[in-house]
Amino acid sequence: MAGQYKQITLTVLALLFTSCDHQDFQAPKTTVCNVAFQELLITELMANPVGADNEKEWFEIYNASGHPINLDGLDFIAAGTGRPKTHRVLSELAFTIQPNEYITVGNAVMGAQTADYSWPEMVLPNAGGYIEIWCADELIDAVSYGNLAEPSQGRSWQRCVLDLEKPDQSPTWCDVDAKTDTYDGENLGTPGQQNHACPMPDHCLDEEGDLRPITQARLWDLIITELYPDTPGADNPMGEWIEIYAFADFDLAGMVLEHLSNDRTRQFKIPDTRCLPLKAGRFYVLSGSDNMYENQGIKEAVPAFSPKGLTLYNSSGTLTFMNKDGEIVAQAEHPAPKSGISIGYDWDSETWCNQRSTGIFDGIGTPGQTNDRCTGGGQ
């Protein structure tokens, strides 16, 4: 693309010099575009970036045709409730999109990550907006957005990558996944790259961002082995955690943890967007964050309860794990905890007791490791 930008710059400069030297200069005419319906697809847009919108708004185009397509003569339309803004691609600024290639159209300068093609006057409203691509009097593709709610600030709105295989069907759109890397230091999206899959019922996103069916846990697939409900001082939702041991492979996506204590009940649902797969034969610490500076110093934690964390009762009670279908898969009755000390289950004596090991995390306990033995019948 760099060579194309250089050629575009030279062409524009040549046109400027020509217009100064010749009073009868006329702008070059664009050729007639040659693009059929949905050979180009709008696949992603950023209408609500963090901070000022200037030079930060963009939309993405994907070549779904199977052959190269030149942008020459295409018309872009962007509008909301006000008067639409339109733009025609001139021959001197047009370039070719290869099959299966993504390019961005943005209001930043030409060549920026979000402006393979620059449309400086483009404005994308946060609510009630739409974008269209036209070739002469034929609509190529269109998307409307923000009719029910504004796109999340700082996150792009993207078309499910699976829909590219069936463009004639109604597409699925969603906010870009919150775990996506930022492309400019503050906004999340995948400009110029393949999108992720949008959430679907009973499906989750794996570690590669691909959509697959959820592998649900069943009874005896796991056991609750340790809990840390009472952080020192004020309760810290990111510092509280539950440890489990997996006897089978399954996904945490969509599972629910219920805590019953003194006729009070709290439920904590694990989001079903990401799979969070677990493998058999391992201990796992489930918390609100995988950042050891937030979760009381645990190096390997699964952020199952992100972003809110856990607020377990600081008293004796019953913990119950249920799968996405509401089936109970694990349950444990535990004694009252002490501040800063975890409670662990001793498999040999089948009792719970305060843990004694130090140095594994900021408190006293054995997260992710074999528990201390219980002596004297428990606590």
Image (tube, helix red, strand yellow):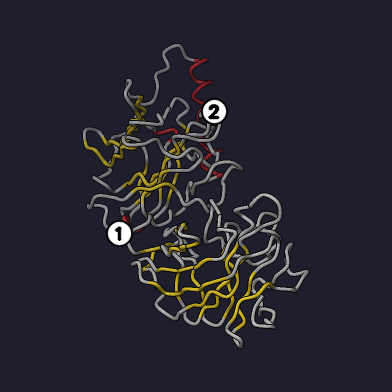
Quadrant containing the C terminus in the rendered view? bottom right
In the foreground, 267 or 284:
267
Where on the picture, by quarter, is residue 245? bottom right
Count neighbours of disc 2 (C-alpha within 10 A) and say few if under 14, some if 14 to 19, many if 20 or more. few
How far apart marks 2 and 1 lie (CA) works out to: 35 Å
The answer to which quarter of the image holds residue 346 is bottom right
- Is 148 displayed left or right of 378 in the figure? left
Q: Is residue 163 left or right of residue 366?
A: left
Say which residue appears at 26% left-offset and 41% top-offset: 140
Mark 1 neighbour density, 10 Å: few (under 14) some (14–19) many (20 or more):
few
Residue ID for mark 1:
165
Q: Is residue 7 above or below residue 338?
A: above
Instruction: Decide which of 268, 139 is in the foreground and name it.
Output: 268
Residue 52: mark in rendering? 2
Residue 106, image x, y percentages: 47, 35
Circle 1: residue type:
Glu
In the image, what residue occupies the spot 24% across and 50% down?
A: 170
Amino acid carrying mark 2 in the image: Ala
Tell me how many marks there are. Answer: 2
Q: Say which residue appears at 61% left-offset and 61% top-offset.
A: 229
Q: Are marks 2 and 1 in contact (CB under 8 Å)?
A: no
Residue 339 image offset from top left, x and y in percent = 69, 60
Find residue 364 and name its label: none
Q: Reading the chain from its start, which is encountered first: label 2 or label 1?
A: 2
Name the foreground residue: 85 vs 129: 129
Under tag 2, what secondary structure? loop
Extreme residue in the right direction: 359
292 with respect to 143 (left or right): right
Element at label 1? helix
Front tag of 2 and 1:
2
